[in-house]
Image: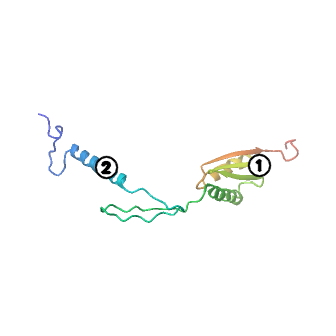
Amino acid sequence: MVPAARQGGSTCQDHPPAGRVRNFYRGFCLGLLVQLAAAPACTHAADGTPAAPAAAADGAMESIVVTAGADSAAQRDAKLAQAAEAALRDDPYIFADHVTVTVKDGVVSLHGMMFELWDLQLARRRLRRLPGIKAVDDDIELNAGMTDGGAGW
């Protein structure tokens, strides 16, 4: 004899069979999709301002227009460049006086010269931890030990 739970039925009256639950969720999701498809499209006036929402005749939900004051990519990059320069300048363990910072699409590029590999590694680690930085690229020339014209110590 096969237990009732394996036959698709339920042995407990409080819990419906799995098939009914699945069908309920399918119908629920399909109903949401139909409502979203029937919602009016967002319309704008000729000057770019959102048009007033039309009155709902059949009890449908009114459309809501959300506008965000998002910064442009250039403004975000400029803010990130300032934050990166401040992070390098304010860290007492990094000597970055000969380094310039540029940012494009959240990727920081370091250009210039450093005297120690340790400084470069610290700078890269410090900049990667800044919020909004996607990657750190460097075009740094290392002049380790070149303090007396290249003769070494």
Which image quarter is the N terminus in? Answer: top left
> Regarding mark 2 in the picture, which secondary structure is present there?
helix
| Residue 149 picture quarter | top right
Identify which residue is drawn at 27% across, 48% down.
27
User: On the image, numbered disc 1 is attached to which residue?
Assistant: 112
Q: Is residue 48 left or right of residue 22?
A: right
Amino acid type for the residue under numbered disc 1: Gly
Mark 1 neighbour class, 10 Å CA radius: few under 14, some 14 to 19, many 20 or more: some
User: Residue 14 placed where, x, y %?
Assistant: 17, 52
Front position in the image: 20 or 56 = 56
- The span from disc 2 to disc 1 (Cα, nearest Å) is 57 Å
Amino acid type for the residue under numbered disc 2: Cys
Q: Residue furthest front?
A: 46
User: Residue 74 placed where, x, y %?
Assistant: 64, 56
Mark 2 neighbour class, 10 Å CA radius: few under 14, some 14 to 19, many 20 or more: few
Front tag of 2 and 1: 2
Q: How many marks?
A: 2
